[in-house]
Image (cartoon, rainbow, N blue to C red):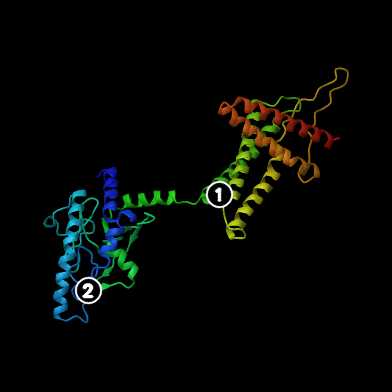
Amino acid sequence: MERTKLERRLEKLIALHFPVENSVEKGVSARKDEVGVNGRGMEKRRASSFFNLDLKNMDAGELWKGVLQSQMIQGSNGDTRAAEQRITPWQDDAAVSKCPLCIASFHPLTNRKHHCRLCGTIICSLPPKLPQRQSPCSVLFVVDAKTRRIEEVGEGVDYGVRRAGAGEEEKFLRGVRICRSCRPVLTRQQYWQEMASVPPFVRLYDAFISLEKEIEDAIPQFQDLLLTLSNDDQPTKEASAARKRLLDAFAQYDAFAKRIRAIPCNTGSSQNHVQLAVLSRANLFLQKHMFPLQSLPKPKKRDSTSSPVPFETPLVDPDSDLAHTLQPLLEQEALLESFVGEAMAHRKFEDAKTLKANLAEIRAEIDRMLGDGVR
């Protein structure tokens, strides 16, 4: 069956069985306090239940009253069943004698028939059993009224024995059954819900680590490209473009680290410590890898009367005082380059002109410090 049709049916079933909380508050408050003729609250049952399994300590009169209560409940269940069948046509009970998925024969007590609420097929609810059933032929799901999260729930009754745990029993009673073949539609919806609920920190940190890996992979290629340039060669367009891409990546990397640090959290909490550690990691990474990219070899001016002097690119120890002094300027240069590119992309030419002037001043100061440092 077409997946989009099943997805639409799933949306309608969720709206039918699990309406948004504020839309059912009045109905819930009226129904939850219903009291039976024996003075006790009317016990909830699934629409397919024949018996109340809690029969001990009941005399004949109480059993008869329970039958009357069951008829009252089945009236409302009948309305729900009719609504389900308007969403999904159900297969005729008489047309099937075995489960089509595991070929197990149906029995009124030991293996009852169930309809998949998405495709209408009749299936069983037996637990896994090798080799014929590696997984259940059907599952139940519920939807939280507040968070709208979909959750699969286990069977509430195993061979006539009610499972312990009021919370699990409540989910079983409210669960909607679908077959194993339609389960991928449900899991797909769960996947998109989980993706939408990923915390901002996780998304930013994943992008931060991914970008760090890309930079580490790109730096050796850039360095190999520089080695191919001779002292008198002008930097190629390829080398200049590679340097520009790396500097843009460094600026984005720094922005990710600062966005992670800016996520609100309690001071002194473990989350706060993690965010500080990410920022420290980013600063160390930038100091280690960003400095060697700040200049490309340029041909040295020759005096026509003097003999050629081989060009030597200034080398600065990354651990030296000069390197630490230059680091803030280098970071500003990278950020200004990214700001200029962004301003040009948005056609903010006046802003771009101002940014370029600032960038020229920063680069002039860097060149001056490099010139003083190698004398």
Q: Amino acid at mark 1?
A: Tyr
**Farthest-out residue, right:** 305
Of residues 11 and 187, the one drawn nearer to the viewer in this rendering: 11
Is 19 displayed left or right of 208 in the figure?
left
- Residue type pointed to by label 2: Leu
Percent position (x, y) of residue 288? 70, 45
The one of 297 and 352 positioned closer to us in this rendering: 352
Foreground pick, 261 / 334: 261
Left or right: where does residue 148 sit relative to residue 125? Answer: right
For the N terminus, which image quadrant? top left
Residue, disc 2: 53
Tell me how far mark 2 sits from mark 1, CA to CA: 52 Å
The quadrant in which the C terminus is found is top right
Residue 346 in sight: yes
- The residue carrying mark 1 is 205
**Residue 216 in view:** no
Task: Identify the residue shown where x is 19% and y is 63%.
Answer: 48
